[in-house]
Amino acid sequence: YCCSTDEGDCVVSKMKKTAASHLSEGNLKDALHTLNKCLALQQKLNGKESVEVADTFNMMGTIMANMGAEYNYRAMTAFEQALKIYQQQIGFGSEESAACLKNLYLLLHQQRVDIKSSEDEDEETASVACYECYTCTEATRNPV
């Protein structure tokens, strides 16, 4: 390493403050970019399975969950990584695990709501598409 653990922790702390500043200004991509660099440093300093790494994954997931649908898969992956580490390091019933599970639930619930609202907007087309799919499947299973 190019620095001691104390110096590394100081750099990580400054990076998190920079990310928080980006967030307060509404610059989600800049915040995410800063946290990604922070994550790499934390993994070198503390190990890939440290609680500090999980905290950063959880924060990154929260940011990506607010960046739009195209980031939802990445957000879910970040939350899952954080949850895995929290459960391994501090237990299934920890506050951190619960908070991360809540974030994951909220993301999945929002995706469900988005899908449901898009179906409601064009309900007739959705019904026809499902019916055609069902008919096609039935015809292949039971040829006349």
Image (cartoon, rainbow, N blue to C red):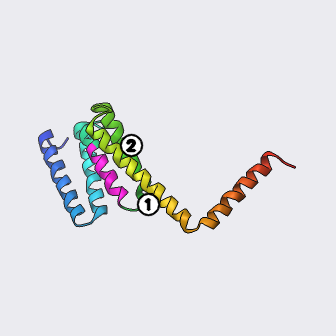
Could one spot residue 112 in this view of the protein? yes
**Residue neighbourhood size for the residue with mark 2, other residues' Cα within 10 Å, grouped as few (<14), some (14–19), many (≥20):** many
Q: Residue at x 64, y 66 (%)?
A: 125
- Quarter-wise, where is residue 92 in the image? top left
Please say whether residue 60 is one of the residues in the magenta stretch: yes
Principal secondary structure, stretch drawn in magenta = helix
Residue 69, disc: 1
| Nearest the eye: 104 or 123 | 123
Q: Residue at x 34, y 40 (%)?
A: 83
Q: CA distance from mark 2 to mark 1?
A: 17 Å
Name the N-terminal-most of marks 2 and 1.
Answer: 1
**x and y, in percent, of residue 123 in the image:** 60, 65
**x and y, in percent, of residue 69 in the image:** 44, 60
Residue 140 to residue 5: above or below: below
Q: Residue at x 31, y 62 (%)?
A: 29
The type of residue carrying mark 1 is Ala
Q: Residue at x 65, y 61 (%)?
A: 127
Please say whether residue 79 is one of the residues in the magenta stretch: no
**x and y, in percent, of residue 16 in the image:** 20, 53
Residue 100 to residue 136: above or below: above
Q: Secondary structure at mark 2?
A: helix
Could one spot residue 74 in this view of the protein? no
CB atoms of marks 2 and 1 within 8 Å: no
**Residue neighbourhood size for the residue with mark 1, other residues' Cα within 10 Å, grouped as few (<14), some (14–19), many (≥20):** some
| Nearest the eye: 123 or 39 | 123
**x and y, in percent, of residue 63 in the image:** 32, 56
Q: Secondary structure at mark 1?
A: helix
In the picture of the structure, the residue carrying the numbered disc 2 is 80
**Residue bounds of the magenta highlight:** 55-66
The image quadrant where one finds the N terminus is top left
The residue positioned farthest toward the right in the image shown: 144
The type of residue carrying mark 2 is Glu
